[in-house]
Image (spheres, rainbow, N blue to C red):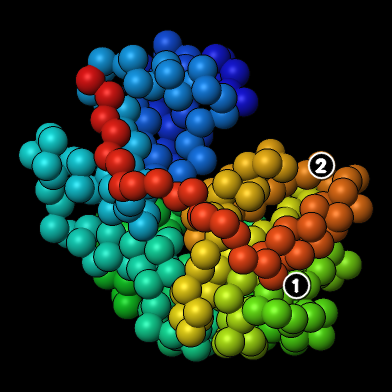
Amino acid sequence: MFKDELFDGDENAIVDFKYSSSPRLTWWFDHHESAFLSPEDEAHFRRDRSGRKFHDPSFKSCTKFIATVAAQRFGWRCPDLDELVHWADVIDGAQYPNARAAVEMKEPALRVLLVIEASREPDVAERIIHDFQTKSLSEIARQPYIVDRFQSLYRWHLETIDVIRKEAQSRDGVVYFDVSEHPVEGYNKFIPYYLFPDVRYSVGVSLSPSRAKVSVGSNPWSPKPRVHNLAKICERYGGGGHAAVAAISFPPDQIEAARRVAQEIAAELRSEPVKNGEGERRVEVSG
């Protein structure tokens, strides 16, 4: 997955993504259950004695994981980033009070998030990163370059809600939708639960110039608990993620294959598994 020439710095890091056995890799942090491309990569990680490669799927976000390791293992703390770390953990871990809070985006952090996720302007992301270092999230959300973009992107967001409402089919606790014929790449993953609050799972198909994607999620506010391990299901098709949310990517010309897989997964989620196979909590640190 990673070519050695990508690791061309004095120190090289992979964050929030799969492990690489490259000898040029200096740092690695990941909190995904599906963290390794192969058993060989996992064995390589377990043999590593650098003390600079870390894996713990119990963390809701890689941001909180990095901050915790930095403080506890290296004695580095940065209180100025506490607000940012908190919201990164809320967002990545779907720790909103309800779907309405996640979709209606009243909080400044969520307004900034929409601009980050939906904007296709590289200089905007770079500007936000610089602002993170000196401004609070509420200050950033009031910046004209954020306000202007948020207003247009939020209109697109509302249109996306209507598209998913139109395309979605809810049955036996699973909502399935195919938005591959609509320009809604990067839609808010909580929209299905906003529209269908009683479902337990969602399975969506989307298409962009770079990939066809099957997104599989569980409703954090479902009255019925999740009983399937979504990462394990998606791994069977070459994808992965977390027990509660996972995905599979296909080349963009394989949209029919993506649809077939999505329908298979939706059918599986409508049944009860024998066991979910999540295993116990495990913290792993090299060295």
Labels 2 and 1: the sequence-earlier one: 1
In the rendered image, which residue does mark 1 sit on? 176
Q: Furthest-front residue in view?
A: 274
Q: Residue at x 27, y 39 (%)?
A: 283
x and y percent of residue 147 in the render? 50, 79
The residue shown at (63%, 50%) is 233
**Mark 1 crowd level (few <14, some 14–19, many ≥20, 10 Å Cα):** many
Whether residue 92 is visible here, answered yes or no, is yes
Relative to residue 22, is residue 225 depicted above or below?
below
Q: Nearer the viewer, mark 2 or mark 1?
A: 1
Q: Residue 176 or 61: which is nearer the viewer?
A: 176
Residue under label 2, please give it: 251
User: Which of the 4 image quadrants contains residue 191?
Assistant: bottom right
Three-letter amino acid code at the position of disc 1? Tyr
Disc 1 secondary structure class: strand
For the residue pair 218 and 9, the one nearer the viewer reads as 218
Q: CA distance from mark 2 to mark 1?
A: 21 Å
- The spot of residue 151 in percent (x, y) is 58, 83
Q: Secondary structure at mark 2?
A: loop
Disc marking residue 243: none
**Quarter of the image that includes the C terminus:** top left
**Above or below, 28 relative to 220:** above
- Whether tag 2 and tag 1 are in contact, CB under 8 A, the answer is no
